[in-house]
Amino acid sequence: MPDITTAIRGCGECPIRHRAVCARCEPDELVELDSMKYYRSFQAGQTVVWSGDKMDFVGSVVSGIASLTQTMEDGRTQMVGLLLPSDFVGRPGRDFAAYDVTATTDLVMCCFRKKPFENLMARTPHLAQRLLEMTLDELDAAREWMLLLGRKTAREKISSLLVIISRRDASLKLKETDGPLTFDLPLTREAMADYLGLTLETVSRQISALKRDGLITLQGKRNITVPDFQALMAETGDDSDGGFWG
Amino acid sequence: MPDITTAIRGCGECPIRHRAVCARCEPDELVELDSMKYYRSFQAGQTVVWSGDKMDFVGSVVSGIASLTQTMEDGRTQMVGLLLPSDFVGRPGRDFAAYDVTATTDLVMCCFRKKPFENLMARTPHLAQRLLEMTLDELDAAREWMLLLGRKTAREKISSLLVIISRRDASLKLKETDGPLTFDLPLTREAMADYLGLTLETVSRQISALKRDGLITLQGKRNITVPDFQALMAETGDDSDGGFWG
DNA sequence: TCGCTTTCTTGATCTCGATCAAAGAGACCC
DNA sequence: GGGTCTCTTTGATCGAGATCAAGAAAGCGA
């Protein structure tokens, strides 16, 4: 059982972009495991690292969801990755974060101090191969997303996102895929918009439209039921066989 | 010096999606190097592999440019990667192509037969680490492109593409970056549109607009001069320091 | 040189999603 | 309960880029 040797709590404001002024970014909790790794937990909405900041660790998600986002000077933002449990973040050999990493839900990460991790990698050939596998998967996902961002309509984008989330949820629960499927959206409308390259109003309207058309039903704002998965799939524009995400 | 032991000229049908109309796909030339690798050359426009086809090799670009594209059932296409000399394509451990790979210009590839290559990888730890590096670079590029596809305007997209191409061209020629910069576009308007998530008409209009505004001049359709690189950069929406592509 | 094809440009119009604006629905606190 | 958040929905309008439609320019083979 890990021993809590440190617990830090920070504070202040978080003005996006001009981060020099940001005094409280990471009121998180830190749990020391050994000389190489430690757990850190974040509440939903907290920032793990800012793009460009020094990042002296790599890590993987233990529980919860984190997002990678890029922001332009004028504030336009695009989510470029969603990190689920077991996903890896950080680049051995690079000292600065390339993206903003944010906790989308409550989040626990297992962090490895960079130097020891790099040493481990040099000693363990299998580790690089495993990371290569994972990175290639991420690259495939990123390219799938490029098709979505570049060519899909708003309705197709929303449907695709719902399909992906419900698929993942179903696989976690090991449920059969026929019959109604119910799950919670782990993202706000705004986060969905940032992921899909839309505005939050359009996201809201398209969700309402899918509801109106009987493709989904809502309980509250975040809980979604898909009565006919195939029907929703047909709205995504993807091959019916499921393609990459299948 | 490699010995030409085989020279094949291939052909047939291409039954992927609606490609049945395609009568001749890969009239390429093959140059055997050794039991593990060989060269193949393609003319501009030829297809290296179709998405979903069996792919019993991995390879890297020797000269020319290849593109990775994804196509939806109704024909919408999105380019998801541009392969420049030294770039790698194919995934060890996967037997089928995930994307259409097309020669954008005349192209020479160095192909490695998959099995021997996988054996080599198992024996050579450094190889996986090198591939990991390259894949992480591609992932960064893909994510940069996601921001472009999701959030940039048509003018910003075109400017970004021109900046990337001119940067690469300048670095190949080892020219100083101040002063006018001249280069040939290696892509048709349609290919640019597929890369940028636009239509070819919009690409054409935006290029005309940049010309009208004095940011570029054209000699013919493909040869572009950038009189003031910083001015063009300012149109991309990116940080002035160049960010990832710098 | 003359077609013929491919590539590119430009114009007119339309539409989907953005933008601007307001109000509803919860959650939380006092 | 009221007050004040944040998140979400919905309406009205606008505009960037798509679509439809001609042509122009360039390349190429006969």
Image (cartoon, coloured by chain):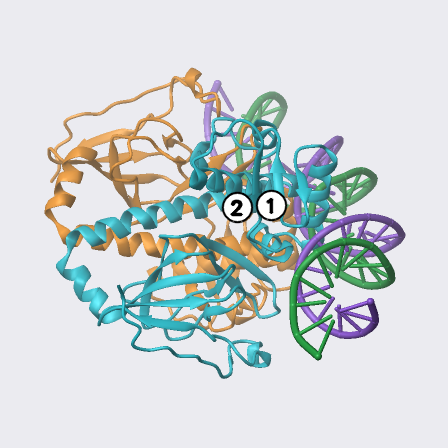
Chain colours: A orange, B cyan, C purple, D green
Residue B170: x %, y % from top left: 48, 38
**Residue A113 position in % (x across, y down):** 19, 34
User: The residue tagged with tag 1: helix, strand or loop?
Assistant: loop
Q: Position of residue B72 (x, y in %)?
A: 56, 66
- Would you name the residue on which mark 2 appears? A192
Q: Are marks 1 and 2 in contact (CB under 8 Å)?
A: yes
Q: What residue type is labelled 2?
A: Met
* Subunit under mark 1: A
Q: Quadrant of the C terminus of chain B?
A: top left
- Coordinates of residue A86 in the picture (x, y in percent): 28, 50
Q: Residue at the location (70% across, 49% down)?
A: B204
> Amino acid type of disc 1?
Leu
Q: In this view, does A86 lie above or below A210?
A: above
Which of the two labelled residues, at mark 1 and mark 2, occupies the earlier sequence position? 2
Please report the residue visible at 43 percent of the width from the left and 79 percent of the height from the top. B9
Residue A89 vs residue D26: left or right?
Answer: left
- Nearer the viewer's eye, disc 1 or disc 2? 1
For the question of whether residue A201 can be seen, the reply is yes
At horizontal 11% and vertical 35% (from top left) the residue drawn is A34
Q: In which quarter of the image is the N terminus of chain B?
A: bottom left
| Residues indicated by labels 1 and 2 sit on the same polypeptide chain | yes
Q: Which residue corresponds to mark 1?
A: A198
- Graded by Cα atoms within 10 Å as few (under 14), some (14 to 19) or many (20 or more), the crowding at tag 2 reads many
Which corner quadrant of the image does residue B49 belong to? bottom left
Q: Considering the numbered disc 2 on the image, is that residue within a helix, a strand or a loop?
A: helix
